[in-house]
Image (spheres, rainbow, N blue to C red):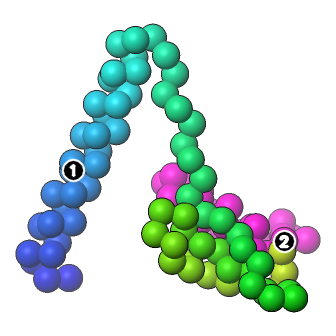
Amino acid sequence: MQPQLQQRVDGLTAMLTRTHLATAEFYAMIGKEPPAQKIRYQVKSVGASAYHIVEIATGKVRGFRFSWKEAVNFAQSLEARADGVKVTLSQAVLQ
């Protein structure tokens, strides 16, 4: 990645982190729980047996699967990765 672009990404990441910390601090000041994290990915049917996993914030398709169960598992793994959890799905878990 180009240095200027990397600096911009780092700056935006720092601002996002500060935003999350400030929000948590404000909720702590009023004694309420912060709202739960919204769902980031949605499974949409695009054919008889085809499903897109769509990022809700951007509307971009992040993947596709040919069974509902696989699509939901993939969306859940994307959610977990977005939360910073390392996920590995074995074949035994998927069945």
Q: Secondary structure at mark 1?
A: helix
Q: Which residues are magenta?
A: 69-95
Quadrant in the rendering for residue 56: bottom right
* Residue 33 vertical placement versus 9 (above, below): above
The location of residue 70, given as percent across then percent down, is 79, 75
What amino acid does circle 2 point to? Lys
The reply to whether residue 86 is visible in this rendering is no
The location of residue 91, given as percent across then percent down, is 82, 75
The reply to whether residue 2 is visible in this rendering is yes
Q: Which residue is mark 2?
A: 69
Q: Give residue 36's mark.
A: none
Q: Secondary structure at mark 2?
A: helix
Q: Which residue is mark 1?
A: 14
Q: Residue at x 15, y 75 (%)?
A: 5
Inspect the magenta stretch and tell me whether residue 59 lies in it: no
- Using residue 48 as the reference point, say whether residue 80 is left or right of it: left
Quarter of the image with the N terminus is bottom left
The location of residue 17, given as percent across then percent down, is 29, 45
Quarter of the image with the C terminus is bottom right
Q: Nearer the viewer, residue 85 or 50?
A: 50
Q: Earlier in the sequence, mark 1 or mark 2?
A: 1
* Residue 30 vertical placement versus 11 (above, below): above
The local crowd at label 1, few if under 14, some if 14 to 19, many if 20 or more residues have their Cα within 10 Å, is few
User: In terms of secondary structure, what is the magenta stretch mainly?
Assistant: helix
- Using residue 89 as the reference point, say whether residue 84 is left or right of it: left
What amino acid does circle 1 point to? Ala
Q: Residue at x 54, y 68 (%)?
A: 55
Q: Residue at x 19, y 61 (%)?
A: 10
Inspect the magenta stretch and tell me whether residue 77 lies in it: yes
Q: Residue at x 51, y 52 (%)?
A: 83
